[in-house]
Image (cartoon, rainbow, N blue to C red):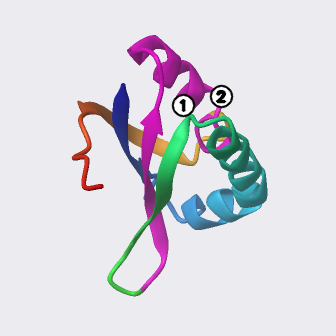
Amino acid sequence: MEFLLIAYDGTDGAALDRRMSVREEHLAYARKLRQNGKMIKGGAFLSDDGKMIGSTIIYQVDSEAEVKEIIANDPYKTNGVWVDITTKHIRLANLD
């Protein structure tokens, strides 16, 4: 099953600092998910002036419960970076 994550960071004055303080931990977590085949692709949303303000990730997992657990354990979630999170069950087109 494939799921799309859309997660916005907080909008307070410390939001970007919070993101940057755990960014390497988040990226290490994402790399493990990618190596285990649980994450297809991901990246940051950018503001008009190029600052990171959120994330989008496509996961490949066995269930909705699994994607919820993955998100709950993401350093961006556990450290209060993501404050507005939406997930959608999706089906990627096979273009091969």
Q: Is residue 59 above or below residue 64?
A: below
- Asked if the residue under mark 2 is in contact with the one under mark 1, i.e. CB atoms within 8 Å, the reply is yes
Q: Residue at x 45, y 55 (%)?
A: 55
Characterize the local packing of mark 2: few (<14), some (14-19) or many (20 or more) Cα atoms within 10 angstroms: some
Which is more toward the observer, 83 or 32? 32
Q: Is 25 covered by the magenta stretch?
A: no
Q: Which mark is residue 45?
A: none
Q: Residue at x 48, y 25 (%)?
A: 61
Task: Pinpoint residue 25: horizontal percent, then vertical percent.
Answer: 77, 50
Which residues make up the magenta segment?
A: 50-77
State which quarter of the image contains the C terminus.
bottom left
Q: Which mark is residue 73?
A: 2
Q: Dot 2 lies on which element?
A: loop
State which quarter of the image contains the N terminus.
top left
Q: So how many labels did they put on this image? A: 2
Q: Residue at x 65, y 34 (%)?
A: 78
Q: Dot 1 lies on which element?
A: helix
Q: Is residue 42 above or below residue 92?
A: below
In the figure, is residue 89 to the left or right of 78? left
Q: Quadrant of residue 88?
A: top left
Which is more toward the observer, 11 or 67? 67
Q: From the image, tell me which residue sits under label 1.
A: 71
Which is more toward the observer, 31 or 7? 31
Q: Residue at x 49, y 47 (%)?
A: 40
In the image, what residue type sits under mark 1?
Answer: Ile
Estimate the spatial distance between the alpha carbons at disc 1 and disc 2, rounded to whole Å: 5 Å
Task: Pinpoint residue 23: horizontal percent, then vertical percent.
Answer: 70, 59
Task: Pinpoint residue 64: horizontal percent, then vertical percent.
Answer: 39, 16
In the figure, is residue 55 to the left or right of 33? left
In the figure, is residue 82 to the left or right of 16? left
Q: Quadrant of residue 87?
A: top left
Which is more toward the observer, 31 or 72? 31
